Amino acid sequence: MPIRPVLTFPNSLLRKRAEPVKKIDNEIMNLIKDMKDTLTEASGVGLAANQVGVLKRVIVISNSPESDIIAYINPEITNRKGKRTVTEGCLSFPGYSGIVTRSISVSARYMDESGGRVKITADELLSQALEHEIDHLNGILFVDHLREHEKLSAVDPEYRPHNHDINVSIKVQDNQYESEFNKKLYTKIGIDDLKLALDRADILKDVEQAND
Ligand code: NI
């Protein structure tokens, strides 16, 4: 199955809310297969459909190198417990990472590929990945403070740095590995857009300077 190019920040589809899947048809099954192949090619932990330009509520997560990649359809977090600080990256910000606050554990429900309704409680990497990927389906990126951003996105879905980003204490590290970007996953234009956007995101620079 084909690998699909991964959209990079600030592509506007990353700021859109994805629509629920009503029926698991061939189109959705093909999307899931392609997303799994794309995640494998990227050696990533998780991928949301927005990131390959499809506004459907589908995410795939590779919880460990030994286990299969799981698809979660219409996933929802039903409960969060505790808070912890973790380092996080995103395939739509290739070469960058930041420190964010995530839950210690989450409960979630979703539909599996055969349409079965599943409930899980997760901690560690899976909990973090579920929060990160379900955020993507709501147009939220790891550089955002969750609750405040949902309020803002209703009036202005486009990215704009805002004060509460400080709360996630972003530390942007300059990417030193440009030549290693996988050309199957990222077009040159995407990478250039990303760099330009990060240059323009004053908040990220401010925090970076504050950490120096
Ligand atoms: Ni991501």
Image (cartoon, rainbow, N blue to C red):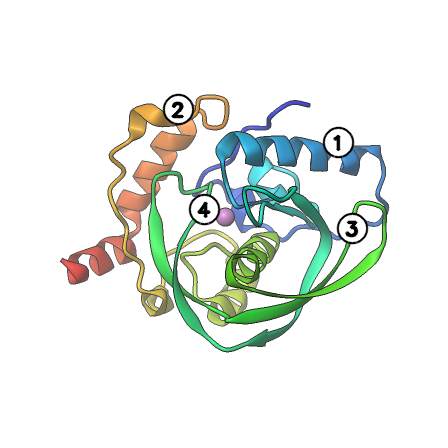
The crowd level at tag 4 (other Cα within 10 Å; few <14, some 14-19, many 20+) is many
Which mark lies nearer to you, 3 or 1? Answer: 3
The residue type indicated by label 1 comes to Asn
The picture places residue 132, in percent across and down from the top left corner, at 53, 56
The quadrant of the image that shows the C terminus is: bottom left
The crowd level at tag 1 (other Cα within 10 Å; few <14, some 14-19, many 20+) is few
Residue 140 in the image: above or below residue 147: above
Please tell me the numbered disc located at residue 90.
Answer: 4
Q: Residue furthest bottom?
A: 82
Residue 202 in the image: above or below residue 193: below
For label 3, being within 8 Å of ligand 1 is answered: no
Left or right: 25, with 39 as reference point? right
The residue type indicated by label 2 comes to Lys
Q: Which secondary structure, mark 4?
A: loop
The picture places residue 196, in percent across and down from the top left corner, at 31, 38
Cα distance in 3D space between marks 4 and 1: 23 Å
Cα distance in 3D space between marks 3 and 1: 14 Å
Which mark lies nearer to you, 2 or 1? Answer: 1
Q: Which residue is mark 2?
A: 188
Residue under the image location 52 percent in, 45 percent down: 45
Which numbered disc flags the more N-terminal residue, 2 or 1?
Answer: 1
Q: Which residue is mark 3?
A: 112
For label 4, being within 8 Å of ligand 1 is answered: yes
Cα distance in 3D space between marks 4 and 2: 18 Å
The quadrant of the image that shows the N terminus is: top right
Left or right: 201, with 127 as reference point? left
Residue under the image location 31 percent in, 64 percent down: 169
